[in-house]
Amino acid sequence: MAPTLYMIAPSPPVRSVLITAKALGIQLQEKAVDFQKGEHLQPEYLKINPQHTVPTLVDDDGFIVWDSHAINPYLVSKYGKNDSLYPKDLKKRAIVDQRLHFDSGVAFARGITIIGQILREGKTSLTDKDKESLTQVYEFLEAFLDGKQWMAGDSVTIADYNLYATISGSNVLVPVDSQKFPKVAAWLKKVDALPEAEVSKKGLEVFTTMMKSKLHRFKARTTDQLVTGTGYYESMTHSHHKFCDRCSVNSVTMAPTLYMLPASPAVRSVQITAKAIGLQMEEKLVDLSKGEHLKPEYLKLNPQHTVPTLVDDDGLTIWDSHAINAYLVSKYAKNDSLYPKDLAKRAIIDQRLHFDSGVAFPAGARITAAILRAGKKSIDDSDKESVNAVYAFLEAFLEKKSWMAGESVTIADYNLYATVTTLNVLVPLDGQKYQKLSAWVKKVDGLSEAEANKKGIAGYEAMIKSLLA
Ligand SMILES: N[C@@H](CCC(=O)N[C@@H](CS)C(=O)NCC(=O)O)C(=O)O
């Protein structure tokens, strides 16, 4: 029996799974989910995937997992002849994981917001803000590709597949300017030419046609200009400059350094993980309000200019809390209980981590940014709804589970706890409506490692309350 993939052809995450399966030589039994008919919201589908997304994989032994960023690592680990698409080497894997979380939380998240407005709200042209938001994604990717042949190093990985599926779609909305982003344009062309990418082209065509029929600016254009892969910058750059995710900035320090800001939920999740495994880190404050994260020194460490960023004692620089937590446990923990090696257990944790990256964390980040940067004095109803939707999904994930991803505590609990305690400051969690989630928060509260969340969350709460007052 072949694994079953619930899918719709034009979905970027679905296309990434098709590419991965093709690269691995796996036959998938494809089952189309009719979104028009709302099949993804029917009880039968919700029983398989309460988050009602595609892709969802049901393996031949009945194991279910959704989220392309969890499915692709699972498929490679289970069916791959070797680990090249998702290396077991901790450092290489940490970089791939960071790229995957970048896709979940930034590249795909931004694209799907715009696509949702086009498909559901009748948007017919992109705003300047939309264009900026996708252009910034290209800027980040251009920096990630500095000194690299592929997205996460010198060979193809699932980071290329996920990001290609997303960016080939974004490219339809905001074409990649090959003058400004020569590395991204060349990379896109290179992935386009891989034999495994072929299986994603029909879906991309459907997506392109869908967008063409909705967006005004396409009315006057020819199909030729729309086909991805045309007009990309021809030449590859051969810079030998090594980007800093391998460089040895801090090679003399003994403890890993964490660039941080205590108010950030992502930072707090790393502090909780470090406490749980008994790891001492040297903490370096990055004052975002003073723009320290945008200074050249910091951009050299992390061109995505986020906190947390970890510089390990051997100089490995890695960012994105989810990638950091997975790396820290794999490198420093006494056993694998916080991030089990067992493929099925790990896949569920990965799905929860990507839910945090792509859905839960952004729901809070949007509101925080509106208060902090746009000076908003209240929270919009639509933003409150998004937070309640996060609570409802998590309540469903906890059905028949003691902890977020099973019967014991994992890094999925740490990441989601740091996020949920943050969301709770913005939109208080209704203990009647979300009983399992409230009980889970209390349970995590009681863990000794949760102590590491307390100072940061208190500071965050005081800041928000004073700004909303
Ligand atoms: N992070 C997820 C995103 C999946 C996702 O949002 N898929 C969209 C289609 S592109 C979907 O199923 N939307 C339906 C819904 O959310 O109800 C992944 O990589 O699988």
Image (spheres, grey):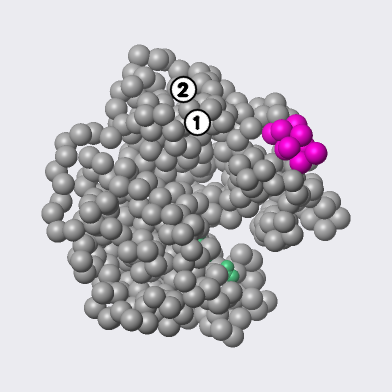
Label total for image = 2
Residue at the (28%, 58%) spot, across then down:
177
Q: Position of residue 365 (x, y in %)?
A: 60, 46
Which is in the foreground here, disc 2 or disc 1?
A: 1
Tag 2: amino acid = Thr
Q: Quadrant of residue 435?
A: bottom right
- Cα separation, mark 2 vs mark 1, equals 20 Å
Residue found farthest to the right: 432
From this view, report whether residue 255 is shown above or below residue 288.
above
Tag 1: amino acid = Gly
Residue at the (41%, 25%) spot, across then down:
312
Magenta-colored segment: predominant secondary structure:
helix
Q: Which of 295/238 is in front?
A: 295
Circle 2: element type: strand
Q: Position of residue 58 (x, y in %)?
A: 50, 69
Residue 22 magenta-highlighted:
no
Whether residue 62 is visible, yes or no, is: no
From this view, report whether residue 364 is shown above or below residue 188.
above
Question: Mark 1: few, some, or many residues within 10 Å (few <14, many ≥20)?
Answer: few
From this view, report whether residue 233 is shown above or below residue 88.
below
Q: Which residue is mark 2?
A: 257
Report the side of 114 relative to 43 (left or right): left
Q: Quadrant of residue 355?
A: bottom right
Q: Position of residue 156 (x, y in %)?
A: 26, 53
Q: Which residue is mark 1?
A: 291
Magenta span covers which residues?
Answer: 460-469
Q: Which of 373/70 is in front?
A: 373
Q: Which mark is residue 110?
A: none
Report the side of 131 relative to 384 (left or right): left
Nearest to N terminus: mark 2 or mark 1: 2
Whether residue 198 is visible, yes or no, is: yes
Residue at the (80%, 39%) spot, across then down:
469
